[in-house]
């Protein structure tokens, strides 16, 4: 997954199903980065996540909100 590559984290399948809302995925990414001992810039993480979603799903940046559901709102399969 592009998110894993971008942030250098793993999203186990069991967790990925729970992270269908972008705000939850963002929080998970930030936490995973912190667990590595780093202090992520949360705004930067959000912008990078948004860019990945826009590129991968072909949606408009305005559609990518923290409340957006990957499948229901953004059409991911």
Image: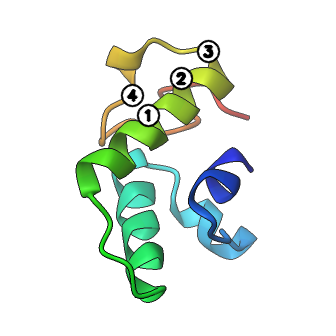
Q: Position of residue 16 (x, y in %)?
A: 63, 63
Residue matched to label 3: 58
User: Could you say which quadrant of the image residue 42 lies in?
Assistant: bottom left
User: Are circles 2 and 4 on residues that touch, CB within 8 Å?
Assistant: yes
Residue 4: x and y in percent read: 66, 59
Answer left or right for 44 relative to 60: left
Local crowd size for mark 2, using a 10 Å CA cut-off: few (<14), some (14–19), many (≥20) = some
The span from disc 2 to disc 3 (Cα, nearest Å) is 5 Å
The reply to whether the C-beta atoms of the residues labelled 4 and 3 are less than 8 Å apart is: no
**What is the distance, in whole Å, between disc 4 and disc 3 at their CAs?**
11 Å
Q: Are marks 2 and 3 in contact (CB under 8 Å)?
A: yes
Q: Which residue is drawn at the image coordinates 40% and 87% (left, top)?
A: 37
Q: Secondary structure at mark 4?
A: loop
Q: Earlier in the sequence, mark 3 or mark 1?
A: 1
Image quarter for residue 60?
top left
Q: Position of residue 64 (x, y in %)?
A: 39, 28
Is residue 19 shown above or below 9? Answer: above
Return the mark for residue 54: 2
14 shown above or below 25: below
Q: How many marks?
A: 4
């Amino acid at each position: 997954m592009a998110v894993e590559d971008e942030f250098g984290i793993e999203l186990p399948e069991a967790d990925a199903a729970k992270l269908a809302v972008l705000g939850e995925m963002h929080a998970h990414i930030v936490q995973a980065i912190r667990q590595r001992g780093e202090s992520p810039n949360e705004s930067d993480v959000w912008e990078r996540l948004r860019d990945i979603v826009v590129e991968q799903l072909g949606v408009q940046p305005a559609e990518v909100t923290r409340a957006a559901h990957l499948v229901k709102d953004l059409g991911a399969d």
